[in-house]
């Protein structure tokens, strides 16, 4: 069950303020890193909702992000629809797609669930890749950004766009926390603990899983439309299963089932990747070693380990006082 | 109320129940006794749709249950408290109870958070404790309370006293007697003969996957042959 502890709140605020400060001081390159980290964090957050709290390891979240990005790109670049309307429709589309994938995949468990989601992800990839109007391997350019001139924000500049990404990351976190603290969130954690028990309590488990997957698709959809607006270009790379894998790596690196962990993992991955890749091409090696160490250290992830150490120290202090 | 007729069931290649007949009547406590491996828990799991019916019929108020999913069976008004209790350990006592209360149909309001806490005052003291911080007895109370919050018409209990201290067994027994006097129908699986005989209106003894004896609790207590042959007492 999710609890928004003081430690989580403080960590979240520090992370968001830190990203904001980097937007102000890091120059253009720094802002690009912040945008990349925020989009990856939103995707990882969506994976953590289903994997960390519902026990559903998904390999199709890259495709959900990509589907939302393509939907937004098609509506703005091909159809000429207003970006604000396209923004909403693309997110609704990824939510519905995720709900449908969740409804079918939830009939399976364990390795079969992973394979089912992977298959759905690949189907989305192939359908978009093979659609001539969507540009195939060449992708699609000319994607528009939201027009916020009315409120005095020039969304074409990198700083306002980076701040919007931070705000949307905070919003995504808030939505996920609210969902997980609700009665539905409790039911979802029950699904993770014991599906059969919940069935015997009268719960339609597949529908709980499908709705959780749909909610997760909503978060992935937000990440997708921001990714499309960021580069103003979409390509099939956004749909690759390796992106789903990267999101899963981020969640495990940061801390599965912690909600703050995915943010920590995404920021760490993006910044470490860029720092190390300027020195060597073998940056994957360092991420791999970090992942192995994380797993060997108890699998709690960076934030999970930090939370574990702080909680243990608090308990020891309370014991000493008693 | 619940009628089981010529039921065959089991796990994988292993058949456990062989043409079992069982009847749980409305407003009564029906106890199912038998040695380990006799098929008691298998019967309950098959009723709840957790194991498939291979042959025979199960009806609840005349409507067949075979083929229905566990959640659909629960919505018919059957609450199942398993042997393993299956408390959600990541949830607090209150959250465990609220989860079950969410599923209760709005027209059935006999059991509320307040009334289950009257039945088990201990739970009221532990509302904000995690499910992982409860003793075995408290877990059993929570499991029964969770079943009651579904406002069932039939409560199925699988060995509710297993592994509990005598004083807790007495508390659980008193609570079940209170439920019996309220008119709730109960199907009870037990190993403790005297505990079951004290509660039950009707007892069925299971042996090798079939009903081998039927009668009242008092009759069973006096039937030395059945006790030694089928219950090992």
Image (cartoon, coloured by chain):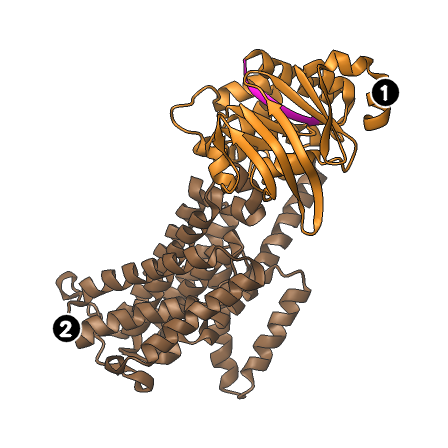
Chain colours: A brown, B orange
Residue B202 placement: quadrant: top right
Answer whether residue B188 is magenta in the image.
yes
Chain where mark 1 sits = B
Q: Looking at the image, which residue is at 60% across and 20% down? A: B120
Measured Cα–Cα span from mark 1 to mark 2: 87 Å
Please name the residue that numbered disc 2 is placed on: A80
The chain ID associated with circle 2 is: A
| Residue annotated with mark 1 | B225
Count how many numbered circles sit on residues in the image: 2
Depth check, mark 1 against mark 2: the one in front is 1
On residue A93, the disc is none
Q: Which residues are magenta?
A: B183-189
Residue B178 at x, y percent in the picture: 60, 13
Q: In terms of secondary structure, what is the magenta stretch mainly?
A: strand
SS class of the residue under badge 2? loop
Q: Is residue B9 above or below residue B61?
A: below
Quick check: is A168 in the magenta stretch?
no
Q: Is residue B88 visible?
A: yes
């Amino acid at each position: 069950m999710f609890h928004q502890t003081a430690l989580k709140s403080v960590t979240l605020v520090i992370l968001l303020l830190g990203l904001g400060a980097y937007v102000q001081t890091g120059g253009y390159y720094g802002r690009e890193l912040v945008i990349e980290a925020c989009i990856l964090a939103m995707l990882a957050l969506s994976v953590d909702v289903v994997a960390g709290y519902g026990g559903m390891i998904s390999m199709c979240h890259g495709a959900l992000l990509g589907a939302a990005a393509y939907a937004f790109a098609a509506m703005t670049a091909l159809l000429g629809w207003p970006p604000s309307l396209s923004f909403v429709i693309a997110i609704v589309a990824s939510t519905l797609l995720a709900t449908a994938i969740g409804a079918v995949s939830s009939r399976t468990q364990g390795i079969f669930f992973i394979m089912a989601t992977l298959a759905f992800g690949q189907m989305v990839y192939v359908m978009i890749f093979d659609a001539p109007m969507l540009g195939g391997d060449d992708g699609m350019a000319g994607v528009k950004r939201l027009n916020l001139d009315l409120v005095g924000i020039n969304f074409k500049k990198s700083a306002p766009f980076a701040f919007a990404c931070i705000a949307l990351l905070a919003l995504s976190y808030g939505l996920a926390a609210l969902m997980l603290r609700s009665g539905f969130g409790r039911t979802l954690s029950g699904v993770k603990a014991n599906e059969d028990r919940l069935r015997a309590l009268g719960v339609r488990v597949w529908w709980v899983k499908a709705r959780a997957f749909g909610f997760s698709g909503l978060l992935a959809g937000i990440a997708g439309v921001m990714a499309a607006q960021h580069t103003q270009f979409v390509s099939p790379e956004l749909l690759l299963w390796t992106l789903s894998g990267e999101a899963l790596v981020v969640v495990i690196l940061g801390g599965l089932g912690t909600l703050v962990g995915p943010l920590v993992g995404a920021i760490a991955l993006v910044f470490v990747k860029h720092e190390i890749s300027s020195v060597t091409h073998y940056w994957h090696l360092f991420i791999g070693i970090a992942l192995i160490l994380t797993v060997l250290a108890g699998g709690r992830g960076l934030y999970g380990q930090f939370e574990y150490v702080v909680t243990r120290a608090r308990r020891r202090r309370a014991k000493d006082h008693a | 109320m619940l009628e089981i007729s010529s039921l065959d069931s089991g796990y994988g290649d292993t058949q456990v129940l062989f043409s079992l007949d069982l009847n749980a009547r409305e407003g009564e406590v029906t106890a199912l006794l038998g040695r380990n491996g006799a098929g008691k828990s298998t019967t309950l799991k098959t009723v709840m749709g957790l194991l498939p019916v291979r042959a025979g019929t199960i009806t609840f108020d005349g409507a067949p249950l075979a083929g229905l999913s566990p959640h659909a069976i629960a919505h018919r008004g059957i609450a199942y408290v398993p042997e393993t209790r299956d408390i959600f350990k990541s949830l607090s006592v209150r959250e465990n109870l609220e989860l079950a209360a969410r599923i209760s149909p709005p027209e059935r309001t006999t059991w509320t958070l307040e009334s289950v806490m009257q039945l088990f005052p201990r739970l009221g003291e532990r509302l904000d404790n995690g499910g992982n911080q409860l003793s075995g007895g408290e877990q059993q109370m929570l499991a029964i309370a969770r079943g009651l919050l579904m406002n069932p018409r039939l409560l199925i209990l699988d060995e509710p006293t297993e592994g509990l201290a005598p004083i807790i067994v007495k508390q659980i027994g008193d609570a079940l007697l209170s439920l019996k006097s309220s008119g709730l129908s109960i199907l009870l699986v037990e190993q403790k003969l005297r505990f079951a005989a004290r509660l039950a209106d009707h007892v069925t003894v299971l042996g090798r996957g079939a009903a081998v004896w039927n009668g009242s609790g008092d009759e069973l207590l006096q039937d030395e042959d059945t006790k030694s042959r089928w219950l090992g007492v």
